[in-house]
Amino acid sequence: MRIDFRAWCAANLTVDQKLGDEWVCTCPACGKTKLAVNVAKSVWQCWTCRFAGREAKTLIATVLGLSPSAADAYMLTRVV
């Protein structure tokens, strides 16, 4: 089982624009509205600070201020 990345992003990120699976959000690393998130592929990249990744855990840890192990535990409690 895995986390519903689309639902998590909708609930935890400031979404500025939605174009299908491509969303523009406020970057948790730099605060600029330049974070491009593909909610279908679970990938993201900030066009300002280059914060990017392919693992939901990394984005969750950054947004919530968690360690990687705490992000793992968090994800286990929020599966679909």
Image (cartoon, grey):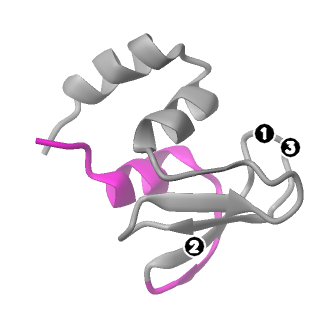
Q: Amino acid at mark 1?
A: Ala
Q: Position of residue 43 (x, y in %)?
A: 50, 60
User: Rounded to the nearest whole Å, what is the CA distance between mark 3 and mark 2?
Assistant: 17 Å
Residue located 43% across and 35% down the image: 57
Q: Are marks 1 and 3 in contact (CB under 8 Å)?
A: yes
Q: Residue at x 42, y 66 (%)?
A: 39
Residue hosting label 3 = 30
Residue assigned mark 2: 23
Magenta segment includes 13: yes
Q: Position of residue 78 (x, y in %)?
A: 23, 32
Query: Above or below — where is 45 with respect to 69?
Result: below
Residue 47 falls in image quadrant: bottom right
Q: Quadrant of the C terminus?
A: top left
| Residue 60 drawn in magenta | no
Q: Position of residue 1 (x, y in %)?
A: 10, 41
Amino acid type, callout 3: Cys
- State which tag comes first along the sequence, 3 or 2: 2
The 10 Å Cα crowd at callout 2, few under 14, some 14 to 19, many 20 or more, is many
User: Marks 1 and 2, Cα distance to the nearest angstrom?
Assistant: 17 Å
- Alpha carbons under labels 1 and 3: distance apart: 4 Å
Identify the residue at horizontal 46%, vertical 57% (top origin).
Answer: 10
Secondary structure found at label 2: strand
Side of 77 where 63 appears, left or right = right
Q: Which residue is mark 1?
A: 29
**Label 1: how many residues lie within 10 Å, few (<14), some (14-19) or many (20+)?**
some
Quadrant of residue 71 within the rendered picture: top left
Which range of residues does the magenta coloring cover?
1-20
